[in-house]
Image (cartoon, helix red, strand yellow):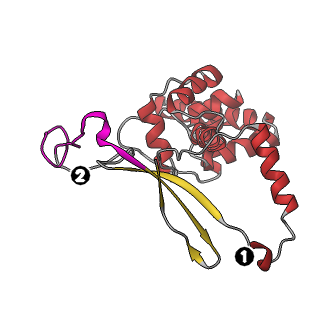
């Protein structure tokens, strides 16, 4: 008799759940389906859509969604959060991982370390790289370059053949001003490969000037 009573109780509970499910709007049902497809948990869907978790579970069952067991701790960042991070970094709204971590905390109250955000961005195909240096142009420089481009946009090949292009540069006598790199199993070990030798006062330099035309390059002149 007890088993029959328990069965009847479960049946009544299912009927109540079905009644609750019928009161859920079609929009919320569509939202539930979309969030299930994106991998949101029943708890997350219940919290964000303000519906009972049993309703979410029933809807998931009706749509034949199977809960996938994942090894290890669940990620702090959902797919929506990761998409937000990708958008913020790609558009330049947040230029560093530290800034992005603060933005997640302020907007969504999500505490995520820079390492966590870095792993998420790498999974989406993003890579970090050193910024290339470029001269800062003032409004005056930009205006002058724009005017030059407009004034010479109709020049022919013969016109450009009458132009001499020139520039100067510095040549270091010892080493380079740029950054140097090396590969090693243990980069903390000091040896000839891992150390860049320097000379007092930089070792000296030479300033030179050169030019080129449509006929070829000109002479290289030392600037005293």
Front residue of this view, candidates 35 and 159:
159
Spot occupied by residue 119 in the image (x, y as percentages of width and height):
43, 42
Distance (Cα) linking label 2 and label 1: 46 Å
Residue where numbered disc 2 is placed: 183
Residue where numbered disc 1 is placed: 161
**Residue drawn at x 64%, y 52% as measured from the top left:** 63
**Residue drawn at x 44%, y 35% as measured from the top left:** 116
In the picture shown, does residue 85 fall above or below 176?
above
**Residue drawn at x 30%, y 34% as measured from the top left:** 201
Spot occupied by residue 80 in the image (x, y as percentages of width and height):
62, 40
Pointer 2 local density, CA inside 10 Å: few below 14, some 14–19, many at least 20: few
Front residue of this view, candidates 191 and 111:
191
- Magenta-span inclusion, residue 188: yes
For numbered disc 1, what is the local secondary structure? loop
In the picture shown, does residue 142 fall above or below 116?
below
Q: Name the chief secondary structure element in magenta.
A: loop
Q: Which segment is the magenta one? A: 186-206
* Tag in front: 2 or 1: 1
Q: Are marks 2 and 1 in contact (CB under 8 Å)?
A: no
Q: Is residue 6 left or right of residue 189?
A: right
In the picture shown, does residue 185 fall above or below 46?
below
How many numbered marks, from 0 up? 2
For numbered disc 2, what is the local secondary structure? loop
**Residue drawn at x 53%, y 47% as measured from the top left:** 132
Pointer 1 local density, CA inside 10 Å: few below 14, some 14–19, many at least 20: few
């Amino acid at each position: 008799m007890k088993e029959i009573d328990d069965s009847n109780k479960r049946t009544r509970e299912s009927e109540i759940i079905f009644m609750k499910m019928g009161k859920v709007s079609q929009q919320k049902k569509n939202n539930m389906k979309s969030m299930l497809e994106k991998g949101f948990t029943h708890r997350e869907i219940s919290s964000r859509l303000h519906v009972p978790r049993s309703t979410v579970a029933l809807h998931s069952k009706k749509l034949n969604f199977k809960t996938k067991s994942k090894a290890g701790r669940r990620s702090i960042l959902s797919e929506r959060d990761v998409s937000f991070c990708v958008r913020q970094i790609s558009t330049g709204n947040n230029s560093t991982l530290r800034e992005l971590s603060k933005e997640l905390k302020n907007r969504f109250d999500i505490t995520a370390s820079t390492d966590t955000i870095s792993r998420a961005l790498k999974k989406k195909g993003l890579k970090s790289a050193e910024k290339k240096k470029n001269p800062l142009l003032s409004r005056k420089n930009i205006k002058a370059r724009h005017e030059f481009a407009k004034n010479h946009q109709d020049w022919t090949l013969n016109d450009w053949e009458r132009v001499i292009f020139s520039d100067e540069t510095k040549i270091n006598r010892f080493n380079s001003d740029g950054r140097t790199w090396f590969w090693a199993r243990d980069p903390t070990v000091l040896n000839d490969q891992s150390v860049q030798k320097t000379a007092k006062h930089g070792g000296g330099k030479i300033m030179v000037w050169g030019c080129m035309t449509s006929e070829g390059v000109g002479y290289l002149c030392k600037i005293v």
